[in-house]
Amino acid sequence: LTGLDVTWDRTYGAGWLAGPKGGKAPESDMLLAVRLSEEFAKGTSSLWAFYLQQLPKSEDYEKFHPLMANRHDLELYKDLPTVKSVENRRRWVRERFKALGLDGHFDFVDFWYAYVTYISRAYGITVGKT
């Protein structure tokens, strides 16, 4: 799904995927993080509850995932290219979160956890090329 555009319908509180899209961070990542956030919010009533309970918690990611690095660590390693990528991705997600009107539906910290969880389990494949 990477590389697709997402349209968010605030009236119905739903999004859908649409045609190919270029860009730094695909909107489809945002949509899929929304879906994951919705499943997390359902708790044990989610059909995915057992799987969701097996995923790393936010505290786990904070120990190793660059996107969950704290300000002190980002400052300490500011000369590494990874830090710039982390800062750019955080900024992009926060901007898209607001632009899509998600702040009325989700807490950003919870959404960020869902976003990091989703992208840490996503991978891309190219169809039609060997």
Image (spheres, rainbow, N blue to C red):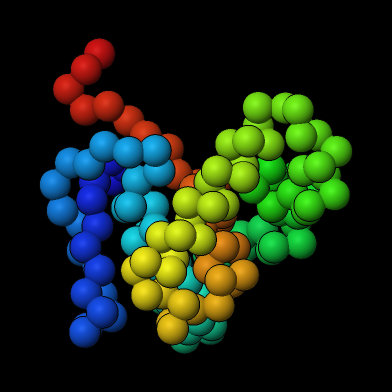
Residue 118 percent location from the top left of the image: 49, 54
Residue toward you, 47 or 16: 16
Measuring 27% from the left and 27% from the top, which residue is drawn there? 126
Figure disc tally: 0
Q: Can residue 23 be seen in this view?
A: yes
Q: Is residue 59 above or below residue 39?
A: above
Residue 41 percent location from the top left of the image: 50, 81
Residue 124 percent location from the top left of the image: 37, 34
Q: In which quarter of the image is residue 88?
A: top right
Q: Residue furthest top?
A: 130
Measuring 39% from the left and 38% from the top, which residue is drawn there? 24
Measuring 62% from the left and 42% from the top, which residue is drawn there? 86
Q: In this view, does 43 lie to the left or right of 102?
A: right
Residue toward you, 80 or 29: 80
Q: In which quarter of the image is residue 10?
A: bottom left
Q: Is residue 112 above or below residue 44?
A: above
Residue 70 percent location from the top left of the image: 78, 53
Q: Can residue 35 be seen in this view?
A: no
The N terminus sits in image quarter: top left
The C terminus sits in image quarter: top left
Measuring 32% from the left and 53% from the top, which residue is drawn there? 28
Q: Quadrant of residue 82?
A: top right
Q: In this view, does 99 lie to the left or right of 107?
A: left
